[in-house]
Image: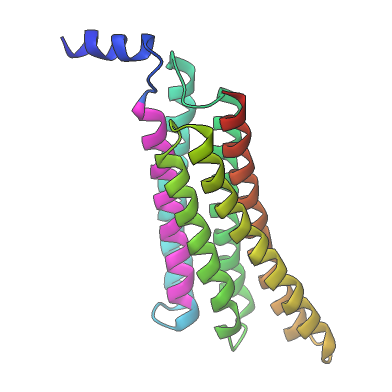
């Protein structure tokens, strides 16, 4: 009986929740990575510990992405276009990969003062949470979904703007090895902002195609 109800839902155009569950699983892993980066910056978690813990978080995100890809192969009805769902998943993966690189490079570079990175990481968390809200509403009307996507994109743009100010600050002083290390770290966070924006675009594009 449950199988018949599921088939009926799919034939009626209702989405398969397994796809959004996989995306939300990806976003959970990504947010865990962002919180780990924030804890490392604050000194709550050491660089070495953060570097090691990020591996398991990345693996969790990869598992959810694989679940999404497998679900796309078998889904009869998707909440938005399959291509846009794949783009969305790939962009979320890019967010997590860039956070992984940020933690790894912090571990390698040992920049003494990491507190300047906190506002950008905080905004990354806000952007991931905005994407979570949009993904939960993937089946909604474009009038609901598109503004949610725009809110996430705005956060991503804000991170990139913060990056520009940080680079200006770095280049206004003496260009030392430490300054270049800082520049590389803020560049990783700028890529996080771009990937959040790309994910938001995939959601908005998918909503407008319906």
* Quarter of the picture holding the C terminus: top right
Q: Residue furthest left?
A: 1
Image quadrant in which you'd find residue 90: top right
Where residue 5 sits in the image (x, y, percent)?
23, 12
Please, what is the dominant secondary structure of the magenta stretch? Answer: helix
Q: Is residue 26 above or below residue 82?
A: below
Q: Against 136, is 153 above or below? A: below
* Residue 171 placement, left or right of 143: right
- Judge whether 187 appears above or below 172 on screen: above
**Callout count:** 0
Write the residue at 43% across / 30% down. Answer: 139
Specify the segment rendered in magenta.
Answer: 17-40
The residue sitting at 40% across, 34% down in the picture is: 20
Name the spot of residue 199 as percent of width and height, x first: 59, 44
Q: Is residue 82 left or right of residue 8?
A: right
Q: Is residue 4 left or right of residue 11?
A: left
Q: Nearer the viewer, residue 174 or 158?
A: 158
Give the image location of residue 56, x and y in percent.
40, 54
């Amino acid at each position: 009986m449950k199988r018949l109800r599921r088939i009926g839902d799919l034939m009626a155009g209702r989405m398969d929740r397994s796809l959004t569950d996989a995306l939300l699983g990806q976003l959970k892993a990504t947010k865990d990575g962002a919180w780990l980066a924030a804890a490392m910056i604050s000194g709550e978690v050491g660089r070495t510990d953060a570097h090691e813990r990020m591996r398991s978080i990345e693996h969790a995100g990869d598992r959810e992405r694989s679940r999404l890809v497998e679900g796309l192969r078998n889904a009869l009805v998707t909440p938005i276009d399959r291509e846009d769902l794949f783009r969305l998943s790939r962009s979320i993966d890019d967010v997590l990969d860039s956070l992984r690189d940020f933690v790894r490079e912090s571990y390698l570079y040992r920049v003494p003062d990491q507190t300047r990175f906190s506002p950008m990481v905080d905004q990354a968390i806000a952007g991931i949470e905005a994407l979570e809200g949009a993904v939960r509403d993937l089946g909604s009307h474009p009038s609901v979904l598109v503004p949610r996507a725009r809110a996430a994109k705005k956060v991503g743009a804000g991170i990139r703007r913060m990056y520009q100010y940080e680079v200006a600050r770095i280049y206004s002083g003496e260009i030392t090895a430490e300054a270049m290390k800082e520049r590389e770290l803020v560049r990783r966070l700028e890529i996080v902002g771009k990937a959040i924006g790309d994910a938001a675009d995939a959601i908005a594009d998918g909503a407008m195609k319906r």
